Image (spheres, rainbow, N blue to C red):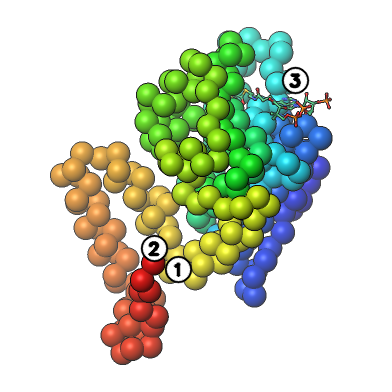
Amino acid sequence: MSNKHIHFELQGEQQEVAIIRLTRSAKRNAMNDALVLALRALFEKMPASVRAAVIDGDGEHFCAGLDLSELQERDAGQGMFHSRMWHAALECVQYGPVPVIAALHGAVVGGGLELASACHIRVADDTTFYALPEGSRGIFVGGGGSVRIPRLIGAARMTDMMLTGRVYNAQDGERIGLAQYLVPKGTAFDKALELAKRVAQNAPLTNYALTHVLPRIAEQPADQGYITEAMMAAIAQSAPEAKSRVRAFVEGRAAKVQRA
Ligand code: 1HE
């Protein structure tokens, strides 16, 4: 399933982890239309063995965002469709079949940050920097950034990034919530893979609840959220896998929670 812009491979004993690597390092993994469509197709046709995925970028930078060389010559209608094409692709990442972990390094800018924010876990190495240069290029985010990024860092910080061109370094990015993990230079992929292998061990229904249901609950008014939660809890508990996992703990056969 690899193509010119994306390398795809399966790892793990059961081929349970998909590795998706952007391979346009000469263009700093800038996303042209072909790459956006290929990303969507990958998530739509994920092999059934896959339980978690890692998205990584070749070279020194995770992703320089939209391929600006394709931005010219687009009228308003085409611009709308183009943005909706990004939305459809990144919806497939966020609400696709499995949890997705981004391995961030170097530039995570513009559409690159939009891609990262569609992932469920972000691991950043200490070369990572985050920016939204759309503000200074006279354009606007179009890949779902205005919806997803404020949910990570708040509208005020995103406004500041776009108005002033503010760049967050790796440490500050982790502090404000752009990444959940901060690791030494060159180790983001290894950490992301380790986490993906761990995530892949969860009951698939629990992972589904976390990636598809929790974000919806978070957007619901509290009284509706409690009802949705109760329904999801009931469905999850009734699955045979949940019953056997809980029984394993009660009978002393499952790992305890370890002190952090
Ligand atoms: C590109 C792109 C790109 C690099 N589109 N070609 N994104 C931006 O505004 C980011 C623009 N890029 C940069 O600021 C820098 O390239 C980086 C900080 C990411 C990396 O710097 P550096 O010194 O390692 O690389 P470079 O020399 O700037 O770039 C290497 C090549 O990649 C060069 O092409 P070359 O033919 O001269 O070798 C660059 O032109 C090319 N390149 N970034 C096209 N983005 C859904 S809406 C989303 C809106 C957006 O994402 S706006 C884009 C924001």
Q: Position of residue 31 (x, y in %)?
A: 69, 32
Q: Left or right of 250: which side holds 190?
A: right
Q: Going by the image, does 228 lie left or right of 36?
A: left
User: Which circle's residue, 1 or 3, is located before the other in the chain?
Assistant: 3
Residue drawn at (71%, 32%) of the image: 30
- The residue wearing badge 1 is 202
Q: Amino acid at mark 2?
A: Thr
Question: Judging from the image, what secondary structure is the residue with disc 3 in?
Answer: helix
Residue 200 in view here: no
Query: What residue did someone put label 2 on?
Result: 206
**Residue 22 tag number:** none
Tag 3: Cα neighbours inside 10 Å, few (<14), some, or many (≥20)?
A: few
Q: Position of residue 16 (x, y in %)?
A: 60, 67
Instruction: Verify CB contact (< 8 Å) between mark 1 and mark 2.
Output: yes
Residue tagged by mark 3? Answer: 69
Residue 195, can we see it? yes
- Nearer-the-camera pick, 84 or 181: 181
Q: Helix or strand or loop: what does disc 1 sit on? A: loop
**Disc with the residue nearer the chain's start (3 vs 2):** 3
Query: Mark 3 near ligand 1 (CB under 8 Å)?
Result: yes
Measure the alpha-carbon separation of dots 1 and 2: 7 Å
Q: Nearer the viewer, residue 177 or 184?
A: 184
Quarter of the view holding residue 63: top right
Q: CA distance from mark 3 to mark 2?
A: 42 Å
Point out residue 134 in the picture as x, y percentages from the top left corner. Answer: 58, 19
Say which quadrant the C terminus sits in: bottom left
Q: Are marks 1 and 3 in contact (CB under 8 Å)?
A: no
